Amino acid sequence: MSTIESVRDTTAEEVDGIAAAAATAAAPWAAMGLPDRSRVLRGIADRLDAQAAELIPLAMRETHLPEPRLAGELKRTSFQLRLFAQTVLDGDFLDVRIDTADADWPMGAPRPDLRRMNIALGPVVNFAASNFPFAFSVAGGDTASALAAGCPVIVKASPGHPALSRAVGRLIDAALAECGSPSGTFGLVFGRDAGVQVLTHPAVAAAAFTGSTAGGRALYDLAAGRPVPIPFYGELGSINPVFVTRDAARTRAAEIASGLLTAVSASAGQLCTKPGLVAIPEEATVFSELAQLIRDRPVPTGDPLNAEIAAGFARAVEQVRAHSNVELLAGGGPGEALLLATTARTVLSDPEALLHEMFGPATLLVSYRNTDELLELARSVGGQLTVSLFGDQVDDTARALIAAAVDTAGRVLWNSWPTGLSVTYAQQHGGPYPATTAPTATSVGTAAISRFLRPVTYQSVPEDLLPLELRTDNPLSVPRSVNGARAR
């Protein structure tokens, strides 16, 4: 069993003090030179790596997660901090655009001198996730991207790993202090009431969240209902459907079955990209291959992160299993993945009951009769983080599936499973509602920094009153567009 330390909830007075300190820190932190901001991010990464021997056992005690998984996640976390540090130094995120005055501008009136760049939004509250105690928690991607953008960060700690949260928070404080960062650049609060209070505090300018659909929607409504609404970047839930064509099912049934079982079992199915629905032609042998795999070579799933997640998973499974046209195909015993089965006709006739995230080691296998039924299903699944397609040739069916996937998901995969989420420049981790509350944004990859920036244009402002990034001589050598042409 996990051992979760009791940590006192942050009081209302303490929340007010933390938010006020973040507001005071906002301008000086945003004004810190890009090299200094980059150095802070690298300093946090260095401290995480240096303290791995203490942090990983602490995470193991609180989360049920095994050491290899946590070691890999910690490496990912320090990597993404260093990637954002490089992003800050590169300066592209500022999106500097300069249009010099032009008396003969073809629109029929003179063009004034216009200079545009991105600036930091202000203090950001980050609601840490429970299933990634490093990569989506106190020093995870939301914190890294907000700090990189020049925003102070207040983290609402996950109740699933409070002692680890406190330990990582101290490392962040140390890295900020070493670089002379303003007091209040980072804060940490504990408790549900503290999270609500900081989200609705006038000093907070944006919020990021990873968690349940119900919890995320409640917080989103609070953010939108403030006297001054703020952006809320919530990742709420996804079933990440997989669509297998007849060609792929006929030639690679065993391979697809094995890959699916691994994807469903990884981290006890507690991944936001776990495939929760798999559409397979009714004559395929994938169903029987999966059942045989569970009997002959069960893949350990691991334990639930905590009692609350275990209870939520049980409720979700019960909702799907209660449907009269859903049957148990295999598994479901202690440490086993659970495979449920139904037909595309059933899902299409009752999507509200069956297109439902089961956050744990379970998936719903759906048999379809023909291509028309497959495409209808693909177009009906709603907003998703990912859609995966398995096929053996590029034909009209594949093209139609990709078109349907693009309409519903932020990441479309061909012949690969969605559970591997690389931190890169081109990554997209987001999608149409209900997968996220902001389909134009990503919470993974360097593009995540754009969530915490807003553009400002200076018109006809004297040179010596402009930010250094917008001055004609470009003293900081930031990349820019000048009269539509790239320059540096």
Image (cartoon, rainbow, N blue to C red):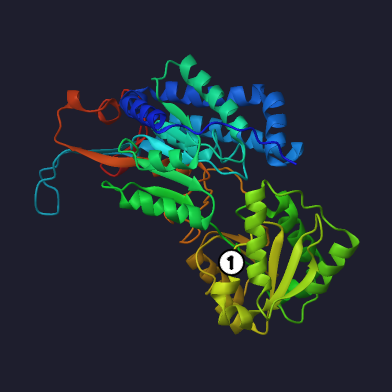
Point out residue 385 in the picture as x, y percentages from the top left corner: 54, 58
Q: Quadrant of residue 31?
A: top left
Task: Report the amino acid beneath label 1.
Answer: His
Query: Is the N terminus in the top left, top right, bottom left or bottom right quadrant?
Result: top right
Q: Is residue 87 above or below residue 350?
A: above
Q: Secondary structure at mark 1?
A: loop
Tell me: 117 left or right of 376: left
State whether residue 360 appears in this view. Answer: yes
Q: Quadrant of residue 461?
A: top left
Where does label 1 land, which residue?
Answer: 356
* Farthest right residue in view: 296
Tell me: 342 left or right of 93: right
Which residue: 67% across, 60% down? 314
Point out residue 279 in the picture as x, y percentages from the top left corner: 67, 73
Query: Is the C terminus in the top left, top right, bottom left or bottom right quadrant?
Result: top left
State whether residue 274 appears in this view. Answer: no
